[in-house]
Image (cartoon, rainbow, N blue to C red):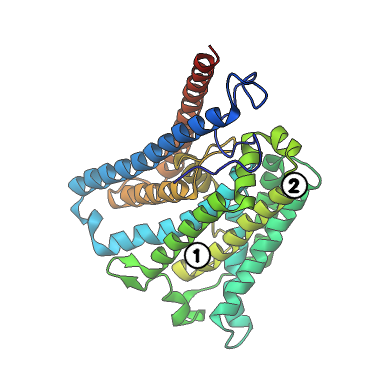
Amino acid sequence: MSPAPSATGPVQGRGPQPVEGHGAGNPGQPSSTLTWSSRRLLDAILRVREVGIVAVLVVFVAVATSVQPRFIDPQNIKFVFSNAIIYALLALGETVVVLSRNVDLSVGSVLGLSAYLSSDLFSQVHHIPIVAVFLAGLAIGLACGAVNGAVVAVARVPSLVVTLATLYIYRAIDVLIVGGGMVVASTLPGAFLSIPTSSLGPIPYLAIAVAGTVAVGAYVLASFRPGRELYAIGSNPDAARLAGIPMGKRIFWSFVVSGGIAGLAGVLWAATYGTIDSTAGLNYELTVVAAVVVGGVNIFGGSGTVVGAALGALLLATINQALYVLGISSFWDPAIDGALIVLAISLDHWITLRLTRALRKGAVQHAT
């Protein structure tokens, strides 16, 4: 995936900024030269990172299959894709937020709230269309995302604080509404429950649709101005502000997008599992953040792709299902997710240091 081009002037969509003293005003080193070299270098790094995830995924599947051959049974592959669909959708929305140097920790709670409220409509409203249920889930997610975005962008409260608070607030609202009840599969239409299970061989049609959505998201972020400006904001907020980028507006809408996607993911969660209570989506935020950073999106913003985040989601879903098939306790899932977050962030830090040194060395050589 090609890195996002500069939004305006010297503001760079990805990677470090030009070395101080070697900018547009320095005749010994034009800024375009540094921008182009850094862009090519970072493009190569991102491609290697995504190819590396695919390689790790292939090796992991091969090892798991050698230990337990039924791991590649068509039904088990369907389970992997079913889980990956939810994670990949949430990772898509999370990536949009993280690119702007923010984070949304409320996605699991938004998913749970949307899953219950939207699926409960089938018993509350007779013969309600399935499309209307999806629209209801989308509206719930958009409302939650708008609250997050308004507090972060308008009140300028750090996103970590805001979304950590709304994680508990939205979950508490969910618990208050659900109480001790639940939605059971018998109250849901067969057509609704068949959405995740309809497949082309072992690959669900929904997985193909999500892959297409990720591709569209990648194209929008790389090719349209709002997407490029998110990269610019995450890469260098001060330079983005001086370039006239509407930072508050972009950050607000990134949270709205994340919330809306989490709302839709909640409806799909309900269709996938059938039984929905107040624990739906519990602790999903850790897995989603892990998928994003493992997929190569810099947790400090400014670089990464939604394709990498989706591949990270597929890798984590595969690992979780492999642990189940191999008979390993699911209590190891959070530990593995946490270890992958530390590993990915450490790798990003190492890559950033090497990239900065390479650019600085090139700048010095050009200047002399």
Could one spot residue 73 in this view of the protein?
yes
Picture layout, residue 194 above or below residue 262 = below
Question: Residue 269 got which mark?
Answer: 1
Three-letter code for the amino acid on which mark 1 is drawn:
Trp
User: Of residues 136 and 108, which is closer to you in this image?
Assistant: 136
Image coordinates for residue 9, horizontal then vertical, percent: 66, 37
Question: Residue 246 got which mark?
Answer: 2
User: Of residues 217 and 366, which is closer to you in this image?
Assistant: 366
**Left or right: 311, with 233 as reference point:** left
Image coordinates for residue 100, horizontal then vertical, percent: 64, 42
How dense is the environment of label 2, judged by Cα within 10 Å: few (below 14), some, or many (20 and up)? some
Residue drawn where x is 64% and y is 36% of the image: 11
How dense is the environment of label 1, judged by Cα within 10 Å: few (below 14), some, or many (20 and up)? many
**Left or right: 210, with 133 as reference point:** left
**Left or right: 167, with 323 as reference point:** right
User: Of residues 348 and 273, which is closer to you in this image?
Assistant: 348
Residue drawn where x is 56% and y is 58% of the image: 279
Could one spot residue 101 in this view of the protein?
no
Three-letter code for the amino acid on which mark 2 is drawn:
Pro
Q: Residue furthest right?
A: 155
Picture layout, residue 296 above or below residue 115 = above
